[in-house]
Image: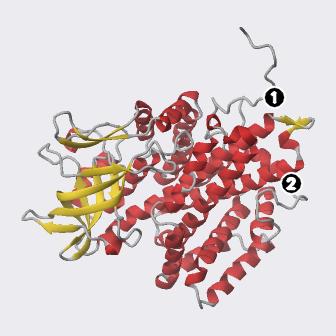
Amino acid sequence: MAATTHTVTNQVPPLVGHDLFATDRVLSEAVERHVEPGVLPVVLEELGELGRAAGSAQAQEWGAQANAHPPVLRTHDRYGHRVDEVEFHPAWHRLLGHAVSAGLTDAWGRPAGHVRRAAGFLVWTQAEAGHGCPLSMTHAAVPALRTDPELAAVWEPLLTSHTYVEGLRNPREKAGVLFGMGMTEKQGGSDVRSNTTRAEPLSGEGAYLLTGHKWFCSAPMSDGFLVLARAPGGLSCFLVPRVLPDGTRNVFLIQRLKDKLGNRSNASAEVEFDGTWARLVGEEGRGVRTIIEMVAATRLDCVVGSAGLMRQAVAQAVHHSAYRDVFGGPLIDKPLMRNVLADLALESEAATVLAMRLAAAYDADTEAERAFLRLALPAAKYWVTKRCTAVVGEALECLGGNGYVEESGLPRLLREAPLNSIWEGSGNVQALDVLRALRREPQALDAFLREVGKARGADHRLDAAIKGLLTELADLDGVEGRARRLAERFALVLQGSLLVRWAPPEVADTFCASRLGGDWGAAFGTLPHSLDLASVVARARPAVE
């Protein structure tokens, strides 16, 4: 019998069926800013296609299914043979296949490759963030492998392929492969120099056998891995294929999958090496230096991924507030909610603009831009990933009880939000790396100051913040205990300078007044009420026809 006790009213239509790229003004403006005119039409077309796919009901359903059905470890086949395979729901493979075909593992050889990939990664991660891990690892393996031209010649075309082939078999028989990474161990965590995995050289050139473990192995279903192990000459980097050239399985014992807070669709594992064949990458004893380029590339993805999560959370909050009526009018028009939404939108815009500027530095690949990245990248990774959890949590609250319900999608975003801050070295690691860059590479600070100096004189609060940062750097007593404070200030000054140069005046004014000028409280929604907050919110609204 039909229910007659009530009529459903004042419910918000789902945010579905729209172009996640085209409706993100901040991102589309950044792409137009950083991509050369001759390449821009092709880039806009491919990002538009990806944006429409990411905003579709189909992609949203894939994301929900992949998280509702997490990966399952199968250690043995029915006959008792060790197979160490990870099984995924079909939705996972559809998400990953679409991402690979869109070029999200292909940045290093295409015009504007890093900007177009970063924009695509930011868009597609909003459909489902978990499968971003193998995309990131595969993309980031390229610069590490280029230290060995022979290995790069074999593997790079497969890593950058736009064809996704699921399942383990001889890589020479596949049109595309995925890579993972194994650095941390039980006893060391971020202190990778305490690793105990042994690498014993074989008679073949560059061949070794590994014995040991990895406490966190990313994307264990991948075709190959870059790992650290201790060779006779010291800590070294190795390529570990899952399937050997003769077609047999390498020894790669998956002990268990991690039961994680979020990132449920993705597999992270503990693995054991017991006579595992590996190929040396780079020189013995220079493993950290070899793998560091892979680490740096994943840092950028942490910034981009967090910017994507923030964008999706803020879009949901603004969309909800535009359609929800309270106390006689739309929620979005209420002064206090407008303040909250504007504050969230500022954080999202600053994160996106910074992420895309870093991607453009990778594309430029000049000595000056590499120096800029050396300081800006760890500072950005520290700050943007830290802000992500706070932004998503506040955005969820904008939906009230509806946001706390799984069907809204916000709980999944909130569980995902802390990951990028932890991955590849948590906050302290990033802050200490900022100090390391300051101490060892003075050209990094010079490059940073040249960058923020491009906006000097445009806003007195930005000028004061730059001066204050320099004052802090002049006093290095107890600097390690102040490392987080310094990393935060580097990131905020850089974000402020970019917004002053490129954002609308109301956005730059509000950011500088709050983040740099100190006219801001400890929670979101505490912006100066006299500023043009309505324009800031309108800019963040995803227009859905």
Which residue occupies 80% across, 58% down?
505
The image shows residue 4, relative to residue 75, as above or below, that is: above
Q: Which residue is mark 2?
A: 532
Which residue occupies 79% across, 45% down?
538
| In the foreground, 169 or 256 | 256
**12 lies left or right of 359:** right
Residue 32 seen in the current view: no
Quadrant hosting residue 271 = bottom left
Which residue occupies 15% across, 64% down?
206
**498 lies left or right of 505:** left
**The disc labelled 2 sits on which kind of residue?**
Asp
SS for callout 1? loop
Q: Residues within 10 Å of mark 2 (few under 14, many from 20)?
A: some
The image shows residue 180, relative to residue 91, as above or below, that is: below
Residue 18 seen in the current view: yes
SS for callout 2? loop
Residue 267: percent from the left, percent from the top?
Answer: 39, 46
Q: Quadrant of the N terminus?
A: top right
| In the foreground, 99 or 402 | 402
**The disc labelled 1 sits on which kind of residue?**
Asn
Residue 499: percent from the left, percent from the top?
Answer: 71, 61
Q: Which residue is mark 1?
A: 10
